[in-house]
Amino acid sequence: MFSIWSISNRTNGIKGPWLPGFISLLFPEKCAFCRTLLLTRGEEIPVLCLACEKEIQWMVPPHCPRCGRPFPKGSTSHLCSDCLKQKLFFDWGRAVVLYQGVLAEAIRRFKYHGDISLAGPLGLFWNRMNLEDLSFEAILPVPLHPARLRERGFNQALLLGKILAKIHNKKVLPKALRRIRNTIPQVQLDHSERERNVRGAFAVREKQEILDKRLLLVDDVFTTGATVNECARVLKKSGAKEVFILTLARVGAA
């Protein structure tokens, strides 16, 4: 079977600027989302075709300064209705892109169909976020229950968190927070049901790991925020100084 490795070995003694192009011709790159040939590289995300890249809607102001909920263009920045009416335990929340179109389909393939090859391309989206002002000390992925982890084979939040950790040279604490109750998948529930579903579902394993620390809690999608808010509540109760929320995507707009 031919591969880039075998081609490189066979051409090891041949020099020339045309070699990379020759290999690309034999093994053309494909868009990570739609799998079409990358005849023209995108500018924002190099592994996407231009058509998929144009579908990406970046999360930009105006938005809620607390949870990052997007507002219609022309709106002023203010606390959203959710932040005004419910008790939030996290100090700041943002997402990189809106959960829609090819991006939403890619996340579903990654999360529910085991296409972990998408972890790298999706992880590139973290580069759009400037997190320097947060001065967080460690990254925590939202944990899966052991039964769900065995079923899925991986924790998508952990894979994405490891990529983010490399970008910012931060430590990942994959076991500091654990899921102690196997809840119903949140996607099947409405807002109030989601809050009840995750209440008491998490616990801190080692308080010393998170005591007085500024923590960045990472997940793939922010829908109502019930899961990350419950995680933040437990972390704060166990002594965390601040809890920031960062998700790859966010559902819906105001």
Image (cartoon, rainbow, N blue to C red):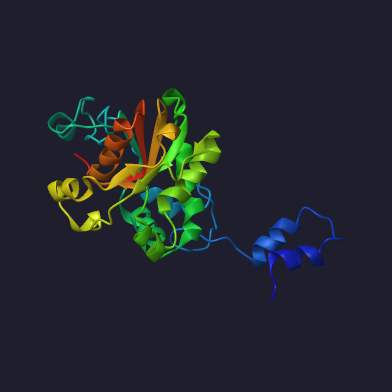
**Where is residue 208 shown, x and y percent of the image?**
43, 32
Quarter of image, res 182: bottom left
Picture quarter with the N terminus: bottom right
Residue at the extreme right of the image, as rendered: 13
* 102 vs 238, nearest the viewer: 238
Quarter of image, res 79: top left
Picture quarter with the C terminus: top left
Q: Is residue 98 at least partly visible in the picture?
A: no
Compared with residue 144, is residue 34 higher up or lower down, i.e. above or below? below
Give the residue displayed 27% in from the left and 45% down from the top. 227
Give the residue displayed 47% in from the left and 29% down from the top. 137
- Report the number of discs: 0
Q: Is residue 215 left or right of residue 188?
A: right
Compared with residue 50, is residue 254 higher up or lower down, i.e. above or below? above
* 110 vs 186, nearest the viewer: 186
Compared with residue 197, is residue 167 higher up or lower down, i.e. above or below? above
**Where is residue 19 shown, x and y percent of the image?**
75, 58
Residue at the extreme bottom of the image, as rendered: 1
**Where is residue 188 shown, x and y percent of the image?**
20, 58
**Where is residue 31 shown, x and y percent of the image?**
49, 58
Give the residue displayed 17% in from the left and 55% down from the top. 189
Q: Is residue 73 at least partly visible in the picture?
A: yes
Q: Is residue 169 left or right of residue 51?
A: right
